[in-house]
Image (cartoon, helix red, strand yellow):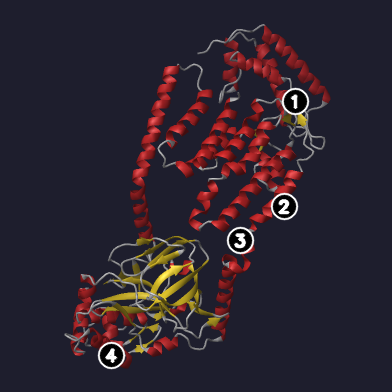
Amino acid sequence: MNGPLWIAAVSLLFWGWESDSLILAALMAVASVGPAFSARRFALGQAEFHRALDVCWVLGIGGLLLVYSREPVGNVFRTFAQWLPLAALPGYLAHIWSTTQRVPTSALVPLPRWRNRAGHANPALDLRSAFITVCLLSTSIAGAARPWFYPATLVVLGAALWLHRSRSASLASTLLLFAVAALGGWGIASGLARAQPWIENRVLEWTSRLDRDGAPSRISRTSIGHRGRVGGSSRVVLQVRTEGPAAALPNLFRVATFSAWRDGAWYATLGGFEKLEPQNDEWVILEGTPTTSTLHLEWARSTTSDLVPHPGSTRAIRELLADKLERSPMGTLRAETRPGVVSLRADLGAAAPPEIEPAEEDRGGIPPLEKKTIDRLAAELDLAGQPAAEVVARIERFFFTKFEYTLDLIDEPIPGVEAPTPLARFLLGHRRGHCEYFATAATLLLRSAGVPARYVTGFLVSPTERSEGFIVVRENQAHAWVRVWNGTTWQDFDPTPPVGLDALVTAPTWWERLQRSWHENTFGLVRWWWLGEKRLLRQAYWLALPLLAILLWRFRTLRAARPASSSTTHPNERPWPGLDSEWYQVEQVLEEHGWSRQNQEPPPAWDARLTRGGWAQADTDHLHRTLHLHRRLRFDPRGIPGPERDHLRHLARQLATRLASLLRPPSRD
């Protein structure tokens, strides 16, 4: 049995065992090992090889689309890679059942420009080792964690390497070298498995330092201290529609919650994320509470970096196509899902899900540079000792009556007043700012009064922004507010003056209307692609079926041939030049007696070695003339004229006669 053929068959069976497709793999293995038991071959020309590899491309692209339409985005490439042997099988079968036992380079890429260029210099390749590698890689995806995977891989690779071992090396040295390589590979694989968490953490830290904004769930950089106009674009973040029992739409959609204020940014310092376990396509956040209303959300995932915008009273998430949904102790939701627009339903309850109780940071986390100003205002408002509800009311009244909301930020020094920070100058001086100023100041004032508070980012939802029955939420509706601890639960408190909220939804100018229209159409196009309206586009793998049928139909005239007639070609195909050259017989004798040219051996060194083996100068000259004519016949697009072809035949016969008198292995230095 041909070694590479049975090695490929074993690799296929190994793949089928690990991927739970043993029956399919067994059928593929039978087809791949058939040439070892049958003398039948097929006269495949360049055009047939092109069609065979085109079938591989159609199966690969169609399979990728099929997996893409049925799997979460995080599993697409992993699942697709497990089926690569099936996509590569037609090309491999064409290779091993052909009379040439080689695949032309032009067949590898299905582009006319590549194939036209490769047609002039079109070397043939042996793809058997590549196919075995593909099988082992696909097997590793399904079973690398199983204890028998590495030993089985060693058996397959060891068999392949054994067939190509050096004949001059002893059996003991060969086995010892393979054992050392196997142990080294095991050590490297084990070390990489142990080092993977450390590497991932270091990469995350490094990329976070490069990223000016950091991870959105851990840090929220504000515009406090900036000058000039702020505010986002009219890009659509999500669309919301109420379903079920009539209920008022919440106007605040939370994205993330933070606890520590330092140097112009808020940080989440209270624990990491915990995975929520799905129950029948539902992630329950708060059990035992009835659903009061349901919201249908269509969310552009990239706009919030995987953080799910949701009302604070969300008790469950349904119909979300995600690999994983996580929740932080402070109520932030993070989903691992595909790109584009994601659809989900949020069930709201009468009570908000619990969040971690106040920590020390929530009670007294006021930076030293801000403390003097905050304590001064807290004293002026007489907040000390007041109940939480009264503290909230006084802060709200203070901001609503004495401050102005604006997106045109200023940060000017106050003559005669000690105000070392932008927040202090906002509170004691110009008293003009946007939601980040109000939410930050209110959080610190609450803490100064002994009321635990946290800073929240999200979006302000306006019921007047509608499109096709959905309420539209845009990037410029990003908002910040406060979570206040009332002694038993956390509650939302929005300290931004109402005039500021109204300013977000004022009548747009013609330019703003044009921008809004552009962003709505962009969102609509992405939504049209990712959600259900035109899902046939996402299931384009069906288009591969008629194309595959056409390619297979074009093989209907394929002729069988015997190995002895390997030089025959398809009637409509130009034969490959040089396959019938008499040089190959000469080359076989040279290889058998150690006279063939070695890899990377210069011609002068080859001549010297032949001379030491008893060759005369006339013999080497005769050899080079014959080889030169063979190479012209084989690789010159113009070929060689008839007389020169006859001369090649004559030279090869003379050289074969001369070799018969030199049947003695050459000496080697």
Residue 525 locus on image (x, y percent): 59, 70
Asked if residue 485 is positioned above or below residue 280 in the image, the reply reads: below
Which circle marks residue 538 in the picture?
A: 3
Residue at position x 66%, y 25% from top? 37
Q: Residue furthest left?
A: 385
Query: Please, what is the three-letter code of the amino acid marked with disc 4?
Result: Phe
Residue at position x 24%, y 86% from top? 391
Which circle marks residue 546 in the picture?
A: 2
Query: Please, what is the three-letter code of the amino acid marked with disc 1?
Result: Arg
Crowding at mark 1 (Cα within 10 Å: few <14, some 14-19, many 20+)? some
Of residue 99 and residue 335, the one placed in the foreground of this image is 335
Between the residue at mark 3 and the residue at mark 1, the CA separation in whole angstroms equals 46 Å
Of residue 513 and residue 474, the one placed in the foreground of this image is 474
Q: Which residue is mark 1?
A: 562
Residue at position x 49%, y 63% from top? 321
Which circle marks residue 398 in the picture?
A: 4
Between the residue at mark 1 and the residue at mark 2, the CA separation in whole angstroms equals 32 Å
Asked if residue 395 is positioned above or below residue 79 in the image, the reply reads: below
